[in-house]
Amino acid sequence: MSPPAPVLTPAKFVPPPEKEPEAVVAQPVVVEQRRWALTALLMVIGSAGAARAATRRS
């Protein structure tokens, strides 16, 4: 008895790997945004403290 004939299966389509877009260095933007956020936070805290001090004195 002969072995069964091999069954041909269609090859899976593998798309070619796409080139990944080059990463843009966003570090300076993040640092600047962090600096502005810290500045805004300090101004809010400072103005709240000034308002509180003004209400205590009057």
Image (cartoon, grey):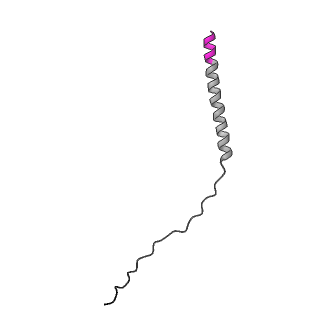
Residue plotted at (33% across, 89% down)? 2
Residue plotted at (65% across, 48% down)? 26
Q: Position of residue 25 (x, y in %)?
A: 66, 51
Occupied quadrant, residue 19: bottom right
Residue 52 appears left or right of 6: right
Q: Position of residue 30 (x, y in %)?
A: 64, 43
For the C terminus, the quadrant is top right
Q: How many marks?
A: 0
Query: Farthest residue in the front direction?
Result: 1
Residue 5 appears left or right of 37: left
Magenta stretch, overall SS: helix
Is residue 42 a member of the stretch shown in magenta?
no
**Please, is residue 51 above or below residue 15 in the view?**
above
Residue plotted at (61% across, 21% down)? 48
Query: Farthest residue in the left direction?
Result: 1
Which residues make up the magenta segment? 51-58
Occupied quadrant, residue 18: bottom right
Query: Farthest residue in the top direction?
Result: 58
**Please, is residue 2 above or below residue 16 in the view?**
below
Residue plotted at (55% across, 68% down)? 16
Residue 12 appears left or right of 50: left
For the N terminus, the quadrant is bottom left
Q: Position of residue 50 (x, y in %)?
A: 64, 19
